[in-house]
Amino acid sequence: MKFLFVTLFPEQIEQAASHSILQRAASKGLIKVSCINPRDFTHDVHRTVDDSPFGGGAGMVLKPEPMVAAIRKAKEQLPNARVIAMCPGGRTLKQSIVEEYAHSGQDFIFVCGHYEGFDERIFYWVDEKLSIGDYVLTGGEMPAIIVMDAISRFIPGVLGKIESAEEDSFRTGLLEYPQYTRPVNFEGMEVPEVLRSGNHALINSWRLKQSLKATLALRPDLLSAEQKELLTGRLPYKMK
Ligand SMILES: CC(C)(C)c1cccc(C(=O)NCC2(NC(=O)c3cccc4nocc34)CCCCC2)c1
């Protein structure tokens, strides 16, 4: 799977893909990460990529020419890729979207914003807008890296043999149960006895109960109505 980033800061992308699982995936040829810098499509001595906004206002807007020239070049290199502009107004990323992307068999061109954002005409060249969530950021590079990370986990061979993203323990859609490893006693805090019992039926039910308890307490929105009812004996709405 190929990931092509249209970005003014290629080193930020290259750095993110040069560690751990993504680095190994790249060296195994499972993913290919590359960048196209709009600054390479400027023709003035200052290599200008941004300019003041029409209508006034603080900050600078990304000029359309360098961005669109870079996107065109990207589409030349990856004609069938999905062109995704990372921006606050996009649909919010969630695991179901990651799975949709991972199973689409497509390559990806991520267009990353900076300064005050894109000239609106750039979006003519974009298939869709995507956001990683509602907080103010300095650029679209880290969001694009997050999307690449999440998609890459689904590519066969990227994760160790132990677990693939499909059977992931995260696949329950619940929060993780508490995890422990050696030592048994750390500064007076002991590992729960059940986890050392060797009784895997008991361990699995303990883990499921812990996941449900944690999810109910911290992220009830992840629970289905039935799961909530099972846990609390109360339905979030009055049954007729
Ligand atoms: C209501 C809300 C979301 C708080 C909001 C409202 C208005 C502006 C922003 C904001 O952050 N503007 C800056 C900007 N952000 C992003 O690119 C960005 C932000 C969040 C999730 C993202 N996912 O991908 C890209 C994302 C980076 C610089 C270029 C202009 C965009 C945020």
Image: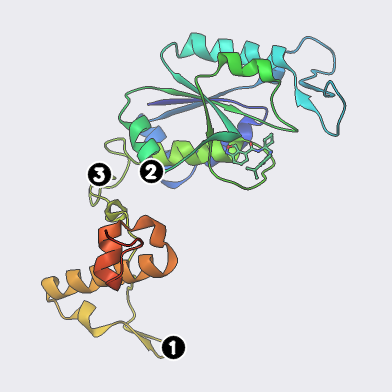
Question: Above or below — where is 113 with respect to 203?
Answer: above
For disc 1, the neighbor class at 10 Å (few under 14, some 14 to 19, many from 20) is: few
Across and down, in percent, residue 39 comes to 71, 19
For disc 2, the neighbor class at 10 Å (few under 14, some 14 to 19, many from 20) is: few
Q: Which residue is the site of mark 3?
A: 166
- Nearer mark to the viewer, of 2 and 1: 2
Residue type highlighted by circle 1: Glu
* Label ID, residue 187: 1
Alpha carbons under labels 1 and 3: distance apart: 37 Å
Across and down, in percent, residue 165 comes to 29, 45
Sequence-wise, the earlier of marks 1 and 3 is 3
Ligand 1 resides in the quarter of the picture at: top right
Sequence-wise, the earlier of marks 2 and 1 is 2
Q: Kindly give the residue lying farthest to the front in the view shown.
A: 240
Label 3 within 8 A of ligand 1 by Cβ: no
Q: Which residue is the site of mark 2?
A: 95
Alpha carbons under labels 2 and 3: distance apart: 11 Å
Residue type highlighted by circle 2: Gln
Across and down, in percent, residue 197 comes to 16, 81
Across and down, in percent, residue 134 comes to 59, 46
Residue type highlighted by circle 3: Glu
Alpha carbons under labels 2 and 1: distance apart: 37 Å
